[in-house]
Image (spheres, rainbow, N blue to C red):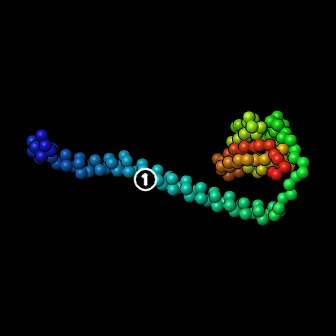
Amino acid sequence: MSLIDTLARRSPRERVLLGLLAGIVLPLALGLGVLLPLHQARQAAERALTEAQVLNAWVAARAGESAAIAPATREPRAVVAAPIGLAALEQSLTLAQLRGSISRLEARETGGIALSFDAVRFVDLMAWLEAQDPDWGYVITSAQIEPGRAPSLADVALELSGATAED
């Protein structure tokens, strides 16, 4: 049985309703069910890209400011402090009142430390980091900083490893 035979057996009213179904309802369902979510996902991706580009530009600007402030060359230290260890690191975080913001603090098999903060005050964290250098015996090998829920808060993940004379 062909489509023409099927339509010929239908009443005129049924043929009109089937025509409306094929001509209006199905394309509308396709548009709302498939194309609209795709469009919304693309807009969200474009917004995320724009935010990432703005963040990248901000970081580049701060790096430029930091380079202008910091001395052009840094003398390598002749004596490198031994890493202070996990307990001493935790104690320094407690003294700096940052212990409550820690979501992960673990020692790595390689001798390094993984450290994550959720909703930490950025200024307090940077003050703590500055106070630790040069005597804590670690270098930051990886840092991921993302904006927190409030303007002064950040979510931070740090990877630390033992310092060497070249660091």
Location of residue 87 (image quadrant): top right
Q: Residue furthest right?
A: 79
Location of residue 102 (image quadrant): top right
The reply, left or right, for residue 128 in relation to residue 155 is right
> Residue 141: where, in percent of width, then height?
73, 47
Element type at mark 1: helix
Query: In terms of depth relative to the viewer, which is nearer, 64 or 137?
Result: 137
Q: Categorize mark 1 by other alpha carbons within 10 Å: few (<14), some (14-19), many (20+).
A: few
> Residue 70: where, in percent of width, then height?
81, 61
> Residue 111: where, in percent of width, then height?
77, 37
Query: In terms of depth relative to the viewer, which is nearer, 111 or 30?
Result: 111
Query: In terms of depth relative to the viewer, which is nearer, 85 or 32?
Result: 85
The reply, left or right, for residue 78 in relation to residue 103 is right
> Residue 159: where, in percent of width, then height?
72, 43
Q: Amino acid at mark 1?
A: His
Q: Is residue 20 above or below residue 106?
A: below
- What residue lies at 86% left-to-right and 54% top-to-bottom? 76
Location of residue 155 (image quadrant): top right
Residue at which label 1 appears: 39
- What residue lies at 68% left-to-right and 52% top-to-bottom? 151
- What residue lies at 64% left-to-right and 58% top-to-bottom? 56
Number of residue marks: 1
The reply, left or right, for residue 142 in relation to residue 12 is right
The reply, left or right, for residue 77 in relation to residue 52 is right
- What residue lies at 10% left-to-right and 43% top-to-bottom? 5
Q: Is any part of residue 150 visible from this angle?
A: no
Q: Quadrant of the N terminus?
A: top left
Q: Is any part of residue 164 visible from this angle?
A: yes
